[in-house]
Image (spheres, rainbow, N blue to C red):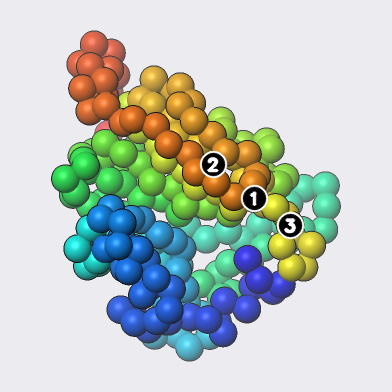
Amino acid sequence: MGRTDRDKLAIMEDDGIGPIQDFLAESACRHRIWLVGGSVPLSCEDPGRVRAACLVYGPDGQRHYRYDKIHLFDVDLPGGDESYRESDTIAPGREPGIVETPLGTLGIAICYDIRFPEYVRLLCDRGMEILLVPAAFTATTGAAHWEILLRTRAIENQCYVIAANQGGRHPGERETYGHSMIVDPWGKVLDRLEREPGICHARLDPCHLRHVRRTFPVLRHRLFH
């Protein structure tokens, strides 16, 4: 998070090439993992804005998917002087983030996207089993809503949620909340990391997900679509 919103323009990369993308690809290949990284500022048709992209790399180091953030954070926070206008420097994406992997069907929501239940339900309708949420929730909004939103999205969509949120103070006196966490389909927090750098980890059990959906079939009981 830069001192100003326009700082991201100085480090934007063309799609497919650049130090951030190279790092993600090399890391996925070196560790033989599926790696989801974002958001990454990628160039677009508007030279004054970027796409906030979340990129999915496989163990082969190849990129398998790109999602561009749809919902932009244009907000004046209550009770303070903090103001955000993402639309000034970010061009919104248009396509929902859903990708098939050997680990399950991943849905992607970047930061502010998580506040829109209709978007996450659309991902669920398209087969989502695990929701990935890279984010930079502010200290103010994070303390009030971060955990509530993550657990709610897990419960109402009966899916796992893996949410990585920046934490700490940034240039320009901005502060992010942290509290990265992994939540199961029953809304239980399996692991969390408060503000310091580190790792959250938990076992994701597809049998547990199917058991929850089968024995508590709220997704099949929906009357309004």
Give residue 88's quadrant in the image: bottom right
- Give the CA distance from mark 1 to mark 3: 7 Å
- Please indicate, yes or no, whether residue 125 appears anywhere in the rendered image: yes
Residue designated by label 1: 167
Q: Amino acid at mark 1?
A: Gly
- Give the residue type at disc 2: Ser
Residue at (56, 30) in percent of width and height: 148
- Of the pair 115 and 24, the residue shown nearer to us: 24
| Residue 101 in the image, given as x and y percentages of width and height | 19, 49
Disc 2/disc 3 C-alpha distance (Å): 16 Å
Q: Helix or strand or loop: what does disc 2 sit on? A: strand
| Position of residue 50 measured from the top left corner of the image (x, y, whole percent) | 47, 77
Q: Secondary structure at mark 3?
A: strand
Locate the N terminus and report the quarter of the image it occupies: bottom right
Query: For this view, does 67 lie left or right of residue 210?
Result: right
**Callout 3 amino acid:** Arg
User: Residue most toward the front?
Assistant: 30
Q: In the drawing, does residue 131 fall left or right of residue 194?
A: left
The outermost residue toward the top is 215
Instruction: Assess disc 1: are there few (<14), some (14-19) or many (≥20) residues with their C-alpha within 10 Å of its C-alpha.
Output: many
| Location of mark 2 (residue) | 180
Note whether 162 is above or below 210 in the view shown.
Answer: below
Classify mark 3: residues with Cα within 10 Å, few (<14), some (14-19) or many (20+): some
Q: Residue at x 36, y 50 (%)?
A: 108
Tally of numbered discs? 3
Q: Confirm whether residue 156 shows in the render.
A: no
User: Which quadrant holds the C terminus?
Assistant: top left
Residue receiving disc 3: 169
User: Does residue 64 sit above or below 155 in this rendering?
Assistant: below
